[in-house]
Amino acid sequence: MQADNSTSRELHDIAVIIVNYNSASSAICSTESVLAAGEKSGRLRVCILDNASPDGSFAVLTHASLSRHWGSRVSVIPSPRNGGFSAGNNAAIGLIARRDPGIRYFLLLNPDAIIEPTGIAALVEHLQRNPRAGVAGATLHGGAGSGVLSGSRRPTPLREFLSTVRLGFLDRKLGARSLRIPPSDAPHRCDWVSGAALMVRRRVLEDVGLLDEGFFLYFEEVEFCDRVRRAGWEVWHVPRARVYHEEGTSTGVSGPGLSQSLHWIASRRRYLSRSHGVSQLFLADLLMVLGCLIHALLAFFLLRRSAPSSSQWRISRVLIDDLVALWRDAVLGPRPHIPVLPPRVQPPSSHLTGLYI
C-alpha cells in the first residue's frame, strides 16, 4: 500500500460515498455531518452521486456545494441512469479510485444517515488496529433513538423462522442461531453489516471486487460480506461508531410499503437461491411463513390481536412471489455483475477538482 505523505497533491485517506435519489435535503445534512466528522478523521473526500433523480436533486446538490463552500472536499456527480444502490456506489468508487490513488478506505453512507463526529475515526481506528478486518460497520439508530445493530448473521432457513416466530424462549435457547447478534459495547465479528454505514478497505475491493449490480436494492451488502469473508478477511461491527438513520428516506419508501417489499422480496430470493440453492430458498419461505403463522395465532389467542400487521402481509407475499418466479424460470434473477476496482493511476501534479466529470 502506497503511503500518503504528500502535501503537494490533494490526496486523501478516506472516501465517503453518498448515493442520492430524490433526497437532496437529507444528503446535504449527511454531507455536513461527514465534513464535521472528517475533522477528527484525517484527510477525507466526499463523493455524492445523484442516481438520476427526477426531482432536480443534482441541481440542488450542486448549488449546496457552492453556497456552503464545500470546495474540493466534496464531488457532486450525476449518473445517467438509476441502476440501484450497488451500481451507484460502484460508479462513485470507480471514479474516485481512478483519480485518487491515496484512498485507503471507502465509507458507504446512506443519504438519510447522520454520522456522529467521532464515527468515521472509530471505524478507521478499528481497521488500523485489526489488519485482517476488511469491513467495519456502525451502529444505526432510528428516528426514535432506538438502537439497531448493524452486525448480523447471514440468513439461513432456521434464522428466517426465528425472525418471524418471535418467541422469547426460542430466542433464549437458540439465540446463537438467530439473525441478529445481541447488543454489545465491544467491537465484535459478524457475518455482515448494513450498507447504510459500511467502511471497507481499498485492498479488500481489489481482492473481491465491488458490489454485485444484480441487486437493485437490499441484500447487496450481505452478498458482498460473504465474498469478503470467503477471501479470508473479517467483518466487524464497531458500536462506538454511531449513525442516526431515517430509514426509507433514501429509497422513497418508509415502512414495509409495496415497492419496498417487492425490491426486498426479489433481492432476498436472488441471494438465497444463489448462495444456498433453490431448495433452501423454498425451505426458508415455508419456515418464514410458518413462523409468522405461529406468531399470529399466539397473538390472537393470548393477546386478542386479529389484524395482521403490514410486516406479516409482506411475509405472506414472499412464498407467492417466489413460486411465480419459479414458474417463470426466474428464481436466480440477473446474473452476477461484479465490477473490479480500477487500477491505481498516479494523478497529475495539479490539484484534483472538487467536481469529477
Image: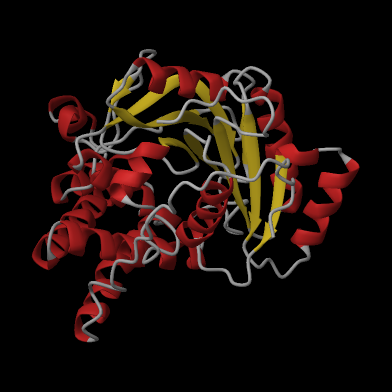
Q: Position of residue 308 (x, y in %)?
A: 39, 56
Of the pair 2 and 266, the residue shown nearer to us? 2
Residue furthest bottom as drawn: 328
> Left or right of 344: which side holds 279?
left
Q: Position of residue 283 (x, y in %)?
A: 12, 60
Residue furthest front as drawn: 349
Of the pair 95 and 243, the residue shown nearer to us? 95
Q: Measured along the vertical axis of the image, is residue 170 above or below residue 249? A: above
Q: Measured along the vertical axis of the image, is residue 23 above or below residue 12? A: below
Q: Measured along the vertical axis of the image, is residue 138 above or below residue 215? A: above
Q: Measured along the vertical axis of the image, is residue 302 above or below residue 56? A: above
- Identify the image's colour scheme: rainbow, by chain, secondary structure or one colour: secondary structure
> Left or right of 87: which side holds 73?
right
Instruction: Mark yes or no: residue 246 visible.
Output: yes
Of the pair 35 and 99, the residue shown nearer to us? 99
Residue furthest right as drawn: 67
The quadrant of the picture occupied by the C terminus is bottom right
Instruction: Mark yes or no: residue 309 visible.
Output: no
